[in-house]
Image (spheres, rainbow, N blue to C red):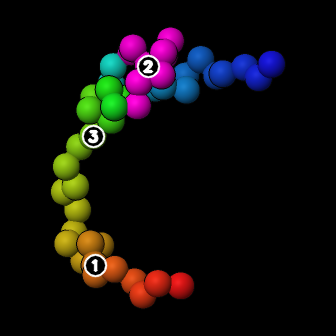
């Protein structure tokens, strides 16, 4: 069985997801608005 490093969740808010799976709660607790340069947000690329 694989082991999980003790500091795997360092820097993330909320602690409920350490014992259960709650993707929505994790995203809600940890999402932050993008405050970077607008040049990074460009138009979509053509399909490959």
Dot 2 corresponds to which residue?
17
Q: Quadrant of the N terminus?
A: top right
Label 3 SS? loop
What is the x, y in percent for residue 15?
39, 15
What is the x, y in percent for residue 2?
76, 23
Dot 3 corresponds to which residue?
31
* 33 left or right of 47 in image: left
Label 2 SS? helix
Q: Is residue 35 above or below residue 2?
A: below
Residue at x 19% of width, y 49% of height: 33
Residue at x 32% of width, y 26% of height: 25
* 37 left or right of 15 in image: left
Whether residue 19 is visible to the viewer of this picture, yes or no, is yes
Indicate the quadrant where residue 17 lies: top left
Indicate the quadrant where residue 45 lies: bottom left
Residue at x 34% of width, y 31% of height: 24
Q: Residues within 10 Å of mark 1 (few under 14, many from 20)?
A: few
Q: CA distance from mark 3 to mark 2?
A: 15 Å
Query: Along the line of sight, which residue is nearer the eye, 7 or 22?
Result: 22
Q: CA distance from mark 1 to mark 3?
A: 21 Å
Q: CA distance from mark 2 to mark 1?
A: 33 Å
Residue at x 26% of width, y 32% of height: 28
Dot 1 corresponds to which residue?
42
The disc, 2 or 1, on the residue closer to the chain's N-terminal end is 2
What is the x, y in percent for residue 21?
48, 22
Whether residue 12 is visible to the viewer of this picture, yes or no, is no
Q: Which residues are magenta?
A: 15-23
Q: Is residue 32 above or below residue 26?
A: below
Q: Is residue 16 above or below residue 41?
A: above
Q: Residues within 10 Å of mark 3 (few under 14, many from 20)?
A: few
């Amino acid at each position: 069985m694989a082991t999980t490093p003790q500091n795997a969740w360092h820097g993330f808010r909320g602690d409920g997801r350490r014992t259960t799976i709650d993707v929505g709660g994790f995203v809600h607790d940890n999402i932050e608005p993008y405050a970077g340069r607008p040049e990074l947000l460009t138009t979509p690329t053509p399909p490959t």
